[in-house]
Amino acid sequence: MKQKALERADEETLVRRTARGDRAAFEELYRRTSPWLAVRLRRRCADDQIVAEVMQETYLAIWRAAGSFAGAAAGGSAVGWVWTIAARRLVDAFRRRAHHAEPPAVLADASAPAAEEEALAGTVGDDVGDALRTLAPELRQVLQAMVLDGLTVRETAVLLGLPEGTVKTRARRARVAMREALS
């Protein structure tokens, strides 16, 4: 009976119950969020060891910090909160590795299109899709993080390891380039 209630609960409820020490709610949150989180992290990092470390650190942080989740009252979502934690852990992992060796390879171009690009292609018209594909990679990265992933400027800056001002500038340049391409 309790498992069915957990399956019907939204992610915010699962985080709130995790904050109260409910292990079953945490396991349900993990079951729901870990597959897409792993895909997103692998899209940004080709090193499976780093992805595994970041996944572990992310869920440990969620277990420990679930009580600090502000939720919809602060304009956030549980899934966005999970992604923000993971993105920060990924940036931290890159920084740790950079101190000891060369940074891990980031997937620049996979042989198959990324799930994000397939989703984007399926939701936008031909003209918009063509305009997106003509954007410089650094502009497209910012648009993907802010539009597809729904991240804020600050979260995008953390994810991409850029100053917030650079993210704002690239977002503005991307909008201008899209407007020009579509006119």
Image (tube, helix red, strand yellow):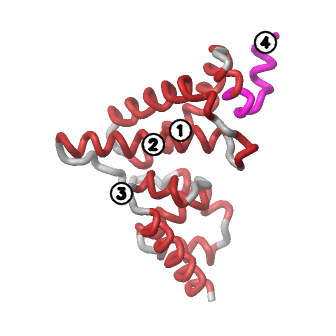
Q: CA distance from mark 2 to mark 4?
A: 31 Å
* Coordinates of residue 34 in the picture (x, y in percent): 55, 31
- The residue positioned farthest toward the left in the image shown: 101
Which range of residues does the magenta coloring cover? Answer: 1-15
Task: Residue under label 1, please give it.
Answer: 37
First along the sequence among labels 2 and 4: 4
Q: Nearer the viewer, residue 114 or 60?
A: 60
Q: Could you tell me which residue is drawn at 52 percent across and 53 percent down?
A: 155
Prevalent SS, magenta region: helix
Q: Can you tell which mark lies on residue 41?
A: 2
Q: Is residue 108 above or below residue 3?
A: below
Quadrant of the rendered image containing residue 3: top right
Q: Nearer the viewer, mark 3 or mark 4?
A: 4
- Height in image: 18 above or below 47? above
Local packing at callout 2 (Cα closer than 10 Å; few below 14, some 14-19, many 20+) is many
Which residue is located at x 65 percent, y 60 percent? 122
First in sequence: mark 1 vs mark 3: 1
Pointer 1 or 4: first along the chain:
4
Q: Seen in the image, is 56 located left or right of residue 62? A: left
**Distance of label 1 from label 2 (alpha carbons):** 6 Å
Residue 62 location (% of width, % of height): 55, 29
Nearer to us in this view, 164 or 181: 164
Instruction: Say which residue label 3 marks.
Output: 108
- Packing grade of label 3 (10 A; few <14, some 14-19, many >=20) is few
Q: Which residue is mark 4?
A: 2
* Residue visible at 36% across and 52% down in the picture: 107
